[in-house]
Image (tube, rainbow, N blue to C red):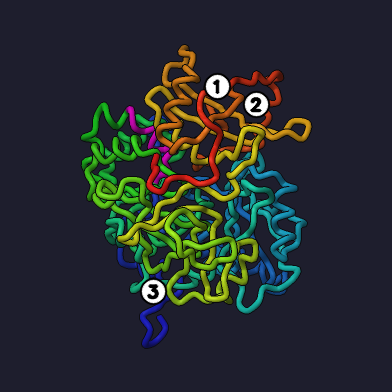
Amino acid sequence: MRRGTGVQSISERLSELAAETPDRPAITELAAGGTYREITYRRLFEDVSALAGLFDSWNRDMDGDAVICHPASVSIESAKTILAALCAGVTVLPHAPLIDAEVLSSALSRAGLSGHLRSVRMPGAPETDQGPGATVRMTRWEHPAEGRRPHYLLATSGSTGIPKLVPFRNFGGYDPRAVPDVVFRTCKWQSGQKQLIVLPIYHIGTVAALIQGVLDRNQLFLANQLDPEEMLDAIADRRIEWLMLTPNYLRHLLPAAARRPERLNSLNGLLHTALPCPAPLKQAWLDLLGGERVFEMYGGTEGVGVTVISGSEWLAKPGSVGRGLLTDIRIGDAQGLERGEDGIGQIYLRRFGASARTHAATPWLRSTSDGFVSLGDMGWVDEDGYLYVFDRAANQTATASGVAWLGRLSLVLRTHPDILDAECIALTDDGQVDVGMLLVTRDPQAVPDLAELERFCATQAGGHGFPRIHLQVAEIPRSEIGKPDATAIRAIFSSAGSREARTPVTSPFEEEVPRGSTA
C-alpha cells in the first residue's frame, strides 16, 4: 500500500482478499443444465499472479510496448486475463471473439498499434482447445501513446465502419474511495454483494463491473449462454442482488419473469444500458420490480459523460434517460454552440473536470473548446434538467419521400403490441435511397397490417412517415448486446430480391419533430 493514500496495486488488493477470505468463492461460472465451476479468492490470486508474471515477461521482451488482444467471453478465463494484464501493467484489449481479423487489424493500425497479430497459447491450454481462453494475440505500440500507457483499450461498436479503440487509464490500482464508482453506487450497488454478469466482457459497463466487483469483495456469477428460464432460476437460487442488462436481454427475459416474478425478489438493483428501451418494455419491468430497483444509464464507450435515471424518476419523466451524474449537458448545434431556441439539438456531454485536452484520444467525436463532446445523438433537456434522446444524427436519412429518422422509427415500431422486434435501415439502389423495415411479429404466423402500423407510427412519432419496403423475419441480426448488425440486415434485403413499393397513407417525414414525442 502506498503510504498516505490508501491506494493499493491490483495485485496487492487481490493478495489482501486471498489472505482474508481464501476459500470464499470469488467467481462462479454458470452454464446450461445447472452445471457450474468456481474459483476462490486464493486460487484467483494465484492464477492471476502467475499469468501476470508471464505477461510481464512478454512485455519486457517487447521493450514495454506489448498489447494483449483477448477474444473475451463471459468466463473465468477472460476475467483472469483482464485482471492479470492490469496487475502486469500491460495494456489489454478485450474484444468480441467473432470480430473479423482484418477489421481488428485496421482498428489497431488506426490507434497507433501494429496491425500484425501474433497468437500465443496460454499455459496449460490443451492443443485441442480452441476456446477464447486458449490463446491470446499479441501486438505492440508502433506510435507510442502520449504519456503513460493506457491500462486497457475498448472498441466502439463499429456500427459506422471500423471500430475505434478508446484508451482507459483507470483501474491502475485499487482506491477504496472510488470503488464502487458513483454510477454503481447510485444504482444500488452494495459492497460484498452477489453480482451477476451477463453482458460480454468487452463492453465498457461490464469491464467496469467485473473489475470493481472483484476489488469490492463481491461474489461474481457469470451467466454463460443461459436461456431465460435458467437465468431467472440462477438469480433466485443464488440470491443475486445486482446485475446489468440491455433492453434486448430485458425483452427476452420478460415472458419468463412475468410468469414467476418471485424469482427476482433478491435483486436490489437492475441497471440497463447501451440502447434505447421501448416504453412498454420499461413499464413492464417497473411493474415487476418497482421504481426503486430499476435504473437506466446513458453514455458511451468513450466515457465522455453519463446520465442516470431511477425507475421512480422515469415514471414522472417517461422517456427520459435522466440527469447528468457528475456531467454537464448542453443541447447545441453542429458546432457545439448552445441553442437558444426551444427544441431538439445535438447532445453534448462534459464530465466534471474535463477539458478539450481530455478528449484528444477520441478525435472522431465532435468536441468544443470548453470540453463538451457529442456522441452523435439528438435530443433535448426539459425544465428540470432531464435529458431525452430522440435519435442518432447519423440515422437521419433523406429519401425520395422525405427525411427518415431510422432509429426513432425502429423504437416506435417496437412499442406496437403486435411487434416483438423491428429495425429500419437505409437501402440504396441505383443511387436512390429508400428505407427498409424488418419486422418480427409476436405471432409468427400473423401477417402485419402495414396500414395500421403506419397509422400507429404517425401517432406515436409526431406525424413521421413510414418505410416503403418491408420484410417479415423470425429474428433480426444483432450483436451480443443487442445492437443491429447493419451488414447482415442489408444482406437479408439483398437476398430477398424484389422490392415492392407501397403508397404511404401518411405524410412524408418532416425535418422538425414536436418536442415531447416519446416512444
Q: Is residue 356 or residue 94 the one in the foreground? A: 356
Q: Quadrant of the C terminus?
A: top left
Which amino acid type corresponds to the residue marked 3 in the rendered image? Asp
Query: What are the residue bounds of the magenta stretch?
Result: 245-255
* Main SS class of the magenta portion in the image: helix
- In the drawing, what numbered circle is on residue 175? 3
Which amino acid type corresponds to the residue marked 1 in the rendered image? Val
Pointer 1 residue: 473
- In the drawing, what numbered circle is on residue 492? 2
- Quick check: marks 1 and 2 in contact, CB under 8 Å? yes
Q: Earlier in the sequence, mark 3 or mark 1?
A: 3
Q: Horizontally, is 159 left or right of 10 in the view?
A: right
SS of the residue under disc 3: loop
User: Does the magenta segment cover residue 261?
Assistant: no
Q: Position of residue 258 (x, y in %)?
A: 27, 30
Mark 3 or mark 1, whichever is nearer to me: 1
Residue reaching furthest to the top: 445
Q: Earlier in the sequence, mark 1 or mark 2?
A: 1
Q: Horizontally, is 8 left or right of 262 in the view?
A: right
Q: Give the answer, above or below, for where 117 lies relative to 458.
A: below
Q: Give the answer, above or below, for where 157 lies relative to 381.
A: above
